Image (cartoon, helix red, strand yellow):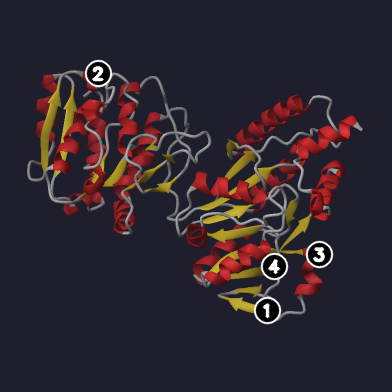
Amino acid sequence: MANNYYEVITEQFKIIKSSKLYDACDVIYVGCLGNPKELHNVSLFFDKTKVKIDIYNSRMDFYEFITLKHLKYIADNTEPFYGFYIHTKGVSYQTVYEGGEYWRDYMNHYILRKWKDNIKRLDKGYDLCGVKLLDDKSAPAYKLHYSGNFFWFRSVYVMKLPLVDSMNITNRFEAELWIGKMQPKATTLCQEFVDYNTKGKFHPPEDHRNICFTLSYNLVSETTKAVKLLYNLNEDFEHYIVDLGFPLEKDIIPDDIQKAQKNNSRKLRELAGKYGSKYLKFKNIGVSQNWTAVYNHTKPSDDDILIGVDPDERPLDKNWIKAMEYIFKTDKTIGICSLMMTDHAKILSEYAKKKIGDLDCYEPINLINWALIGINGKFLNLIKEIPYPEKAPKYGWIEHGLLELLKQHKFRWVILCDYRVEHTECSTIYRQWKNRVIFELDKGQIDFIDWLCDKKKM
């Protein structure tokens, strides 16, 4: 009980009441730390019908551990139940970090207002549900936890967890790691990056996410054009710039590859800051594998869309993201939707157009148009990863593998007739490498940087 704690518990309990979460609860346990005089004020605030202040200690250095200890006790000694855990996030640093309020509002929204969505996930067999889930598949990798430590749980999972007293309670961050210690089946409602430095005021988004990402393995100038066009033509999306360590600053082989990569990283961070995109840095492990890494990081729900916005693709029409969103909402059997590559227009025109809602689409059987695609979150959550040919792990045709998976799971691939995209080429050096790894497969697929080093020796 410190700083503006009373204001925070007031706002949180208001949400609990207005969202009808209070009505759904059998009991709400509250833990309190701090001045004994404040405990009286807290006891007067809460309705005694369902709220029990079972935990109190005057020592502020017990942090969240004392309440988590009681959570463990209740789970161990009660019939199986669903529960949620929250705290007064940000009160300790109220005057130090301006992002505390944003972070708390973000978590309050998804854990309290969206409580029914959390329960739906638990009903599907998940042990935990929350927001900003970090694990060994995140970038960088972490021990599994929910950053901020707001979450819903199954009590039968909590029963498996170690006693809180067995942890190092002098390290307050151990409190966040406790809930993930027994390899739970965990899920998330949102992966927006939020921390104490997040500026502004949190505004709840729509129930689904249009997740766009740009795998920046190309000249930064091309990524810049793609990102600018993305924002000029669309709204209502979140965007990630994924720095994969591209080794060229210009269309020449650099004397110092590491210096070029460092300069590119700086420019990409600046680009992300300019447009409000999120910056990620991944190791380049191959096109399909990079897609999978982004999928693992963003953790789309079944209602979300994951869209690859490549540096060498230039959409021509406004609101193409909304068009994709409309297709997926209108027909739940659509697994992949792509824009129409202008180079393919003549071939596709030989096929009959189909109406999906109000939009015209092509659906040529066994013909794939790999041109700026969006993938249905439900389909992604079934296949778990983007396939790639065994002979082409670095850069290869993945269309056939996806087509087979679509058929297997009874999904379809459609092409938007009236939303076009052009393919561009910029770096002749990069194109030389692509030609080498595509058309000379018998020699194996050499990494681009290794290929550059070999060229320098010639």
Q: Is residue 425 visible?
A: no
Q: CA distance from mark 2 to mark 3?
A: 65 Å
Residue position for label 1: 353
Q: CA distance from mark 4 to mark 2?
A: 59 Å
Q: CA distance from mark 1 to mark 3?
A: 18 Å
Question: Which quadrant is home to the C terminus?
Answer: top right
Using the rendered view, name the quadrant where residue 428 is placed.
Answer: top right
Residue 323 in picture, x, y percent from top left: 60, 64
Q: Earlier in the sequence, mark 1 or mark 3?
A: 3
Q: Is residue 421 left or right of residue 425?
A: left
Q: Is residue 132 left or right of residue 385?
A: left
Using the rendered view, name the quadrant where residue 368 is placed.
Answer: bottom right
Residue position for label 4: 368
Residue position for label 2: 61
SS of the residue at dot 3? helix
Q: Is residue 260 above or below residue 18?
A: above
Given residues 72 and 426, the one toward you in this image is 72
| Residue ranking furthest to the bottom | 352
Question: Which quadrant is home to the N terminus?
Answer: top left
Q: Earlier in the sequence, mark 2 or mark 3?
A: 2
Mark 4 and 2 residues: CB-CB less than 8 Å, in contact? no
Q: Label 1: how many residues lie within 10 Å, few (<14), some (14-19) or many (20+)?
A: some
> Could you tell me the amino acid type at mark 3?
Asp
Q: Is residue 323 above or below residue 152?
A: below
> Could you tell me the amino acid type at mark 1?
Lys
Q: Label 4: how many residues lie within 10 Å, few (<14), some (14-19) or many (20+)?
A: some
Residue position for label 3: 343
Q: CA distance from mark 4 to mark 1?
A: 15 Å
